[in-house]
Amino acid sequence: MAFEQEIQRRRTFAIISHPDAGKTTLTEKLLLFGGAIHVAGAVKSNKIKKTATSDWMEIEKQRGISVATSVMGFEYKNYKINILDTPGHQDFAEDTFRTLTAVDSVIIVVDAAKGVEAQTRKLMQVCTMRKTPVMIFVNKMDREGKDPFDLLDELEAELGIGVRPLSWPINIGQKFKGVYNIYQEKLNLYTPNKQKVSETVPVDLNSAELEKFVGEEDAKKLRADLELIDGVYNPFDVNTYLSADIAPVFFGSALNTFGVNELLDCFVEIAPAPLAVEAQERKVTPSEEPFTGFIFKIHANMDPNHRSCIAFVKICSGKFERNVGYKHVRLGKQLKFSSPTAFMAQKKETVDEAYAGDIVGLPDTGNFKIGDTLTSGEELHFKGLPSFSPELFKYVENADPMKTKQLQKGLDQLMGEGVAQIFTHQNNGRKIIGTVGQLQFEVIEYRLLHEYGAQVRWDPISLYKACWIESDDAKELENFKKRKFQYMAKDKDGRDVFLAESGYLLQMAQSDFEKIRFHFTSEF
Ligand code: G4P
């Protein structure tokens, strides 16, 4: 296949949702369609059991082959699809946010009964910031849920994006009869079945045929609903989806393999092929022949016998080849990879070549940090891997004075891997670790001890948010830093960070210092 075609047929995306909305089930059904797996129930590994223990080692054990499920590739209708896993539950971490910087689009799964929940809202903020095209799948229509019009309003209000239904449910819960596919103008009748794909029938909405399929009452309601949709929403325009202004919405039941086919067909048709990526020096287009890529995730192997990591590189342009030398820009070093891995379904296998849009895993022994750029020789630095304001903070203290150096080295390495963020308090010089999930503290403590022989103690600090600050008015900035000295810190790159103790104090600071801009990500 021609080089350009190889890239155009790639669709790299993430499914995001609140735990339990159905992400695993939907992923599994997508793989089923792609023929990548043959029975439902196969994708269990990217999921932590709900009996969830807060013990990190136990979680790590359960994750088992989580590296393989970090990316799941499969072929469908001549498209090469790459799904990036966004871990939820207890292992929710900054990593999850960062994964979204490596995708070209996103599918959000929402539980019809619960609507938009906290984790979805958080992850959507990253999509909004990056203007990532979003599609929404309203799941569990086979259960009692909210009124679909109310849900659409909620999606718009909570996610801050316009919506446009492309399928419409006929009743819900026990009376659920199926969906009318607005995009294809077909009726999809519901038969609960976990393994088989339901059938669609073309139907003229204005003929009596509709009554035959769904009964008089539901036919009447469907016609009225569709009329209302046409009145309220503009006709669907793909460009508004690509510009991240409108999210097309589908309804279905992942568990019953219902509505998933329509979602996937529409997705491959309209979702963007790999997009251009901004580097500090210039914009890089995927079809440029020289290879470029960046590291967005580093997965440490927790097995003490195999202490290596896997660095995940998103290919931004060209073709990546095994055993070819590439430039590690930050280190100014030439590196060759003899066993790069790609991910097909749930299998990890060595690859000889991969194209823009693909993700490749590179075995690593400490060469890579999050955000590192690899190229065929050009001096490039990809942008767009911001740190996000953590939500949980603790002072980290050295519990073994004999191991100060080891602790320093360990912290440097772990922060480089993007496990958490470190800040240095200006007032007392103490180090603060910030995370988005409680578990990360356990991860850090364990890894510092087992990989670096360093021991830490955590001291509490009550903080609400850390925000990066800037201002066009240098004097005002100095004034702010002086006045708020006891709340100021530096991030790992030496940038100024304001430590807000509460939402109220943050608001006060914002209103007292109107010329200061407060940012919740490190890139602005
Ligand atoms: P997650 O990855 O987003 O956390 O959710 P997951 O797919 O594991 O789904 C959470 C629960 O919701 C699972 O049930 C799953 O079977 C169920 N589910 C998913 N899609 C649908 C649907 O369309 N309709 C209905 N009724 N249920 C659905 P569970 O009992 O918690 O787990 P399991 O024992 O089935 O794995």
Image (cartoon, rainbow, N blue to C red):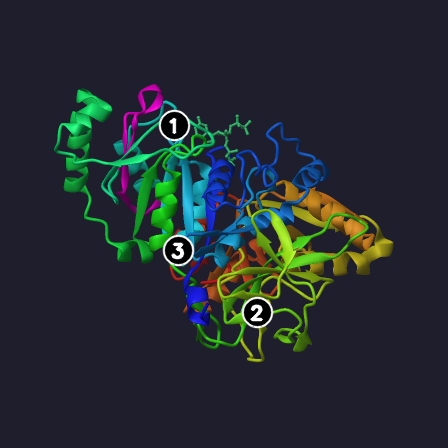
Residue at image mark 3: 132
- Disc 1 secondary structure class: loop
| Mark-to-mark CA distance, 3 and 2 | 25 Å
Name the residue: 50% across, 58% down.
102
Mark 2, residues whose alpha carbon is within 10 Å: few (<14), some, or many (≥20)? many
Q: Do the residues labelled 2 and 1 touch (CB within 8 Å)?
A: no
Q: Are marks 3 and 2 in contact (CB under 8 Å)?
A: no
Position of the C terminus, as image quadrant, is bottom left
Say left or right for 507 vs 338: left
| Mark-to-mark CA distance, 1 and 3 | 26 Å
- Disc 3 secondary structure class: loop
Name the residue: 81% across, 48% down.
399
Which of the pair 54/342 is nearer the observer? 342
Residue at image mark 1: 113
Q: Is residue 482 above or below residue 146?
A: below
Tag in front: 2 or 1: 2
Mark 3, residues whose alpha carbon is within 10 Å: few (<14), some, or many (≥20)? many
Does the Cβ of the disc 2 residue fall within 8 Å of ligand 1? no
Q: What residue type is labelled 2?
A: Phe
Q: What residue type is labelled 3?
A: Thr
Residue 124, horizontal then vertical, whole percent: 42, 47
Name the residue: 24% across, 41% down.
182
Question: Which of the two labelled residues, at mark 3 and mark 2, occupies the earlier sequence position?
Answer: 3
Q: Which amino acid does label 1 sit on?
A: Ala
Quarter assignment of residue 172: top left
Question: Which of the two labelled residues, at mark 2 and mark 1, occupies the earlier sequence position?
Answer: 1
- Disc 2 secondary structure class: strand
| Mark-to-mark CA distance, 2 and 1 | 44 Å
The span picked out in magenta is: 159-180
Residue at image mark 2: 320
